[in-house]
Image: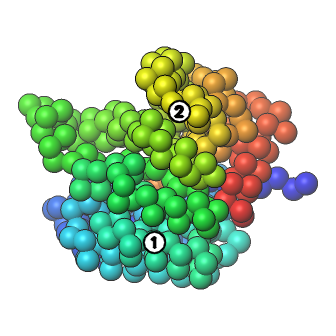
Amino acid sequence: MLMKTVTLEEHFVTQDFFKATHAEGDNMPPALKAVRERLLDIGSLRIAAMDEASIDLQVISLAAIGVDALAAAEQTAVLRSVNDEAAAAVNANPTRLAAFCTPGLKEPANAVKEIDRCITQLGFKGVYVNGTTDGKFLDTPEFFPVLEAAAALKVPVYVHPAPPPASIMSVYFDGLAPEVAMPLSIAGWGWHAETALHTLRLIVSGVLDRLPTLQVIIGHMGEGIPYALARSNGILSAARKSAPRTVTETFLEQVHVTTSGYFTRPPFECCREVIGLNRMMYSVDYPFSPNTKGKEFLEGLNLSEADLTQLTQTNAERLLNL
Ligand code: GRE
Ligand code: ZN
């Protein structure tokens, strides 16, 4: 079998999205400024960067900083245009690109319709969620139909971090200089803690028990959960006296992990030992991390060909129905 390398936490942005979130010019978040050109390119520049690092297929998703600040109707409309642009990019390079659908969660009924459109008409491979919506996590009842739609269409939900709500920003990060407060609240720490919490909330709320076929993907080598799982499982499973499964059992039946943004051996080994390679998928977090860094990391792991094929290809092909 010819080996193929797939990555699935790889981001883009559209001009319309930048316009809607007022991110252009002086307002552009520093995290986006450095990679603006690469985010906006869903064609030749991206594919050249994939070729440089032997990536055959990217499953792209919106870098959605600012999405939660949009009013509900505008969010629905602009994300529809984002999904259309992603579909056009995939159509232009169908062997190199696939896409996740980003629905506007402020209007859950429209989000369900958009998910259905993206999966059944545009051929998208999953649903992409960015952090909290108006301060609410995905276990909030109004989002249940959205998760139910993904489960019914047999596509996974990728839970990606986003900058915290204003109240959290203030309580947790006030008093620090802005040039460190923002990065500490996102990729420097905060959003990994928040996404781990998001995942555990989906488990302890019972939402995953109510949708036992739903599959969730989290990035960043499991957002710290592999390291913490034994302790969280002990405490939380004891607290869930009538739950049908333990926290660990639920995680191992319904959550998958990508390596996005993590390029060192210790967290990889921890994740492999706790979660198992069969639930892990290679990803880069392009363009926030360079594809070449991923290639170097993969090569340094010295995995057997069978393990490497699982990590970079077959697990993703199976889960995303590629
Ligand atoms: C990401 O989406 O992974 C991301 C951002 C902004 C900064 C760093 C980062 O959206 O990893
Ligand atoms: Zn990312």
Where is residue 38 shown, x and y percent of the image? Answer: 44, 63
Count up the numbered dots.
2
Q: Check the image and name the residue furthest to the right.
A: 1
User: Looking at the image, is 191 positioned above or below residue 90?
Assistant: above
Q: Earlier in the sequence, mark 2 or mark 1?
A: 1
User: Looking at the image, is 34 positioned above or below residue 15?
Assistant: above
The foreground one among 67 and 245 is 245
Quadrant in the picture for residue 99: bottom right
Mark 2 or 1: the one toward you: 2
Residue drawn at (67%, 23%), measured in percent from left and top?
A: 273
The foreground one among 33 and 132 is 132
Residue drawn at (25%, 45%), measured in percent from left and top?
A: 164
- Secondary element at tag 1: helix
Q: Amino acid at mark 2?
A: Ala
The span from disc 2 to disc 1 (Cα, nearest Å) is 28 Å
Residue drawn at (53%, 79%), measured in percent from left and top?
A: 117
Q: Amino acid at mark 1?
A: Val
The foreground one among 29 and 158 is 158
Q: Which residue is mark 1?
A: 112
Q: Which residue is mark 2?
A: 243
Residue drawn at (17%, 61%), measured in percent from left and top?
A: 27
In this view of the protein, can residue 117 be seen by the observer? yes
**Left or right of 82 on screen, residue 264:** right
Q: For mark 1, does the 10 Å Cα neighbourhood hold few (<14), some (14 to 19), or many (20 or more) residues?
A: many
